[in-house]
Image: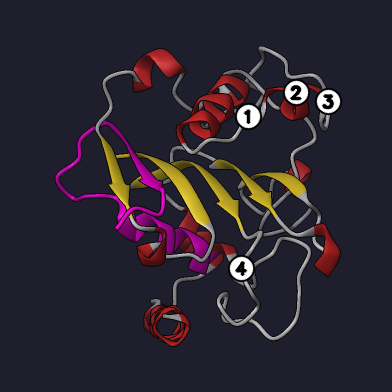
Amino acid sequence: MRLGLIAAFAIAHLAAPGLSEAQSQAGRRYAPIGLFIGAIEEGARIFTPARLLPREHPEALGHDFPTVQQLHATEYPLLLWLGERVGLRLGPTLQRYPAEPDSLWPYQGLEAPPDTAALRDAPVRRRPRREAPIPGLRASVYDGAELVAFIVDTRGLSLEERGMTRPTSMGLDVTRREFLERVETASSALDRGFSVVLWDGKE
């Protein structure tokens, strides 16, 4: 099982097209919002919200996975809703960290993620965790083929299972381009509008 996961992870890494960061960001309507949950005992930041703003945005500080300073507009209820789908109660933590959510959307040129009413009728697919394109991926939301939101939880996964040799602060060792390319392989070309994939461990 572990060898199969590592092999698939390596093949996906080698097969990823050589797009530049600017090319991978071009034409995107969203700055995907998500959570990386890691094992504190290996040095990871145990709970890290990330918003994938363009690297040139002042708030991104040139990082692939900029840490969220404050949740805006529909991000807070969306992450609560998505967490509940995979058994995570995120309310108390998200309410106080890193700051109180607000109702503003300050990112001109980028769309705010959908509210929970917009997701009420979205198709939901359940897939085994072993098939996740990124180790630890628990849930992902798409608009067509574009990633909108995600939750990654690497607790309980060995470094070997993640295809890594040493810990990192986010529990994975991938670039933004690799992350987006792999996670977006789980969207269906047949989907129009919003859809959800849950990696819930069922075979």
Q: Residues within 10 Å of mark 2 (few under 14, many from 20)?
A: few
**Distance in Å between CA atoms under marks 2 and 1:** 8 Å
Q: Amino acid at mark 1?
A: Arg
Mark 1, residue position: 89
Q: Residues within 10 Å of mark 3 (few under 14, many from 20)?
A: few
Q: Say above or below: 82 vs 203.
A: above
| Local secondary structure at mark 4 | loop
Mark 4, residue position: 157
| Local secondary structure at mark 1 | loop
Indicate which disc residue 167 carries.
Answer: none
Badge 3 or badge 1: first in the primary sequence: 1
Labelled pair 1, 4 in contact (Cβ < 8 Å) = no
Where is residue 98? Give x, y as percent.
83, 32
Where is residue 88? Give x, y as percent.
59, 35
Mark 2, residue position: 92
Badge 4 or badge 3: first in the primary sequence: 3
Q: Amino acid at mark 4?
A: Leu
Mark 3, residue position: 99
Labelled pair 4, 2 in contact (Cβ < 8 Å) = no
Where does the magenta region start and end? 177-203
